[in-house]
Every structure is written in C-alpha cells, then in structure tokens.
Image: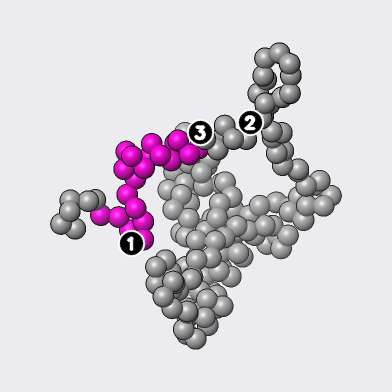
Amino acid sequence: MSSGEPSTPSGTDPMTPRSTFLSGLMVAASLAATLTVAPSSAEPTLVAPPLYTAQRTPAEENPLAGHAWGVYQGPMDQAWLPYAASTGAQREELAKIALTPKAKWFGAWIPTSQIAAKVCDYIANAQAGDPDALVQMTVFRMTPWEGEACRRLPTKAERRDYKA
C-alpha cells in the first residue's frame, strides 16, 4: 500500500474520521426521521414511535426450561485443571468460573477422524450421567470461510468433514 493507507481485511474500508462522522450523522438523521410531530395548534410535540418489547416464552412452552445445564470437568476447559489443583480461597474464586456452564468450540482444527469422539466425550463428561442435562457447544467447521467462500463452494471432502 504505497498510498500510506492502513492495511485492512480484504473487502473492508478503514474507518476514517470523516466516515465515522458521516456514520454518526446518518444515525442522527435516521433517529430524527422516526420522530413525528403531533398535530396541535400550540407548540409541536415530538412523539417517539413505540418501543418494541420482546415477548418471553412461557416456561411451559420452553423446551429448555427445567433442565439442568451440564458443566464439563476436564482438560478441554481451561479453567478446570487450575480449579481442580487449587485449595482454599483460590479454589472458591476459581469455582465461579470452572463450575459455570459454558460453551465449548469444536472446529476444523480438530481432525475429522477425532471430532465425533471428542464431541461424545465432552457431552458425556458434562452430563455426568444425567441424560437430560443440557450441554452447550459451538460448531465451527465451515470451509471455505470468509473471502474464499465468495469465490467457491465447498468441495465434497469439505462437505463430508462438515457433516462429521
């Protein structure tokens, strides 16, 4: 980049002070456009549109309600080994992290030949014998990814690996 512009990921523009200002101006204009003037013979009154309030799913309709969340207790959790080796006040503090249910990432960095066994082991550990315990995990095995995904479709091997 000989022009002295900062390097950015492909396909993105750097946020310059001018573009930041323009973005802020657009937000302000959008907000102003959503306000309406109430009809009145006296002074105009600004009336904001009604706010959206998310509706909660009743517990009896929520399939996750009433189930315990499993907590993985092993080396795939970075907090577990320090917690298991600690005592006293340090253990009490680490328990706040180690004993909290959290999601585990499973991705293409795990070989296809190992992914099923690792996921099954993780679930079995987190459920600790309770088949109704819920286990959080995140699967990230999409290949191609980012810009490459715009130029080509996954190969047969990549589709097979994703389904593994």
Q: Which residue is mark 1?
A: 10
Name which residue lies at 67% across and 20% down.
45
SS at badge 3: helix
- Mark 2 or mark 1, earlier in chain: 1
The range drawn in magenta is 7-27
For the N terminus, which image quadrant? bottom left
Task: Give the image location of residue 155, x and y in percent.
Answer: 46, 84
**Residue 60 lies within the magenta run:** no
SS at badge 2: loop
Are the two marked residues, 2 and 1, in contact with CB atoms closer than 8 angstroms?
no
For the C terminus, which image quadrant? bottom right
Depth check: give the residue in front, 57 or 102.
Answer: 57
Q: Which residue is mark 2?
A: 35
Q: Which residue is mark 3?
A: 28
**Residue 10 lies within the magenta run:** yes
On the picture, is 57 further left or further right than 101?
right
Name which residue lies at 67% across and 14% down.
43
> From mark 2 to mark 3, how far is it between C-alphas?
11 Å
